[in-house]
Image (spheres, helix red, strand yellow):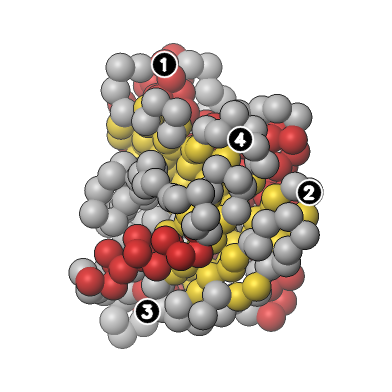
Amino acid sequence: MNPVVVVHGGGASHISKDRKERVRQGIIRAATVGYNILREGGSAVDAVESAVAVLEDDPEFNAGCGSVLNVNGEVEMDASIMNGKDLSAGAVSAVRCVANPIKLARLVMEKTPHCFLTDQGAAKFAAAMGVPEVPGKQLVTERNIKRLEKEKHEKDAQKLDCQKNLGTVGAVALDCRGNVAYATSTGGIVNKMVGRVGDTPCIGGLAGWLLLPLPLSTSSHPRFSAPLSLSFFLRVPPLLGGSFRISGSGSWTGRSCLGQALLSEGVSEGTQLSVSPRLHIFGVTWEGDGGCPRAAP
C-alpha cells in the first residue's frame, strides 16, 4: 500500500507576500517529516503527530509557538489526534506552557481512559507524564502581540469568530498497513476570552474532526467522493470546513469551503505536491502512479 501524508497550514484571509514562501516551506518541511516516517515503516499516528509538531515549532503558523493571544495576551492552545485503526482519540484544550499540544493529545489517547482533558487537568496530566513546561512568554511572538493590539482597536473586535482569525493546522496520513490517522492543533482566535475552546479538539463534533471509514469502490478515485462529504458543510451554512479523502491505493484529494486560502502539501511515493493558495472552493488531486497534481474545480 502506498503511504501518503497531507498537511495543511490553516485558513487565512490574507498572507503577506513576505510570509508566503516561509509558510509554504514550513508546510513542505512538515509533510516531508511525516512522509519520511511512513517511508521507513512508521505508523500513520507517528506521521501526523510529527508533521503537526513541526508546524507547532514554526512561529509562522497559529499553533504552538506561533499561537495567537487571548484577551489577556496569553497563549491557550487546543489539539486533537485520532487513530483510524481502532478509532481511539485524544484531545486537549486551553493548555498553556506546553510547546507541543499535539504530543500531549496523543498521551491522552494512549495513557488515559479518557479522550479529552482541559486547562488545569491537562496541565497536571502533562506534569505527571514528564512533559517539559515552557515559560508562557516563550510562546508569545512580537507579531502576535501586534496582532492582538490591532484587533483590540478595530471597530468590530467583539466579533471574535470572524473568518480572518481562522488558523488551525493539521495532517492526515495513510501508512503502508492501510491505517489512517489525523492530527490538528491551533492557538484559536485573536483576542478570544480566557478559556475559549474552538472546534479543533472536538472529535466528531459538528465542526470538529472525525475519521470516517467511508467505502470506495475499487474503480473510484477519492476526487469523486470528496464533494459528497464536503456537501455536508455546504448544506449547513455558515459552517466553515473541508474534507480530505485517501483511498487504499494512496490516492487523495482535499476540498475546502473555507471561502479563503487553504495551504496544503501532500507527499505520495516521494513526490511533493506543491499547492498555492486559492480562494473559495479549493482542492488538489493526486492522479496516482505517474500522474500529476492538479487543481480541482
The earlier-in-sequence mark between 2 and 3 is 3
Spatial separation of the CA atoms under disc 1 and disc 3: 44 Å
Q: Is residue 227 visible?
A: yes
Q: In terms of secondary structure, where does tag 2 sit?
A: loop
Horizontal and vertical percent position of residue 60:
63, 60
The answer to whether residue 3 is above or below residue 297 is above
**Residue 153: mark in rendering:** 3
Spatial separation of the CA atoms under disc 2 and disc 3: 47 Å
Q: Which residue is at the front of the view, 290 or 104?
A: 290
Q: Amino acid at mark 1?
A: Lys
Q: Which residue is mark 2?
A: 270
The earlier-in-sequence mark between 4 and 1 is 1
Query: For mark 1, does the 10 Å Cα neighbourhood hold few (<14), some (14 to 19), or many (20 or more) residues?
Result: few
Query: In the image, which is nearer the foreground, mark 4 or mark 1?
Result: 4
Q: Which residue is mark 4?
A: 175
Q: In terms of secondary structure, where does tag 4 sit?
A: loop
Query: For mark 4, does the 10 Å Cα neighbourhood hold few (<14), some (14 to 19), or many (20 or more) residues?
Result: many
**Residue 111: mark in rendering:** 1
| Residue for point 40% across, 68% down | 227
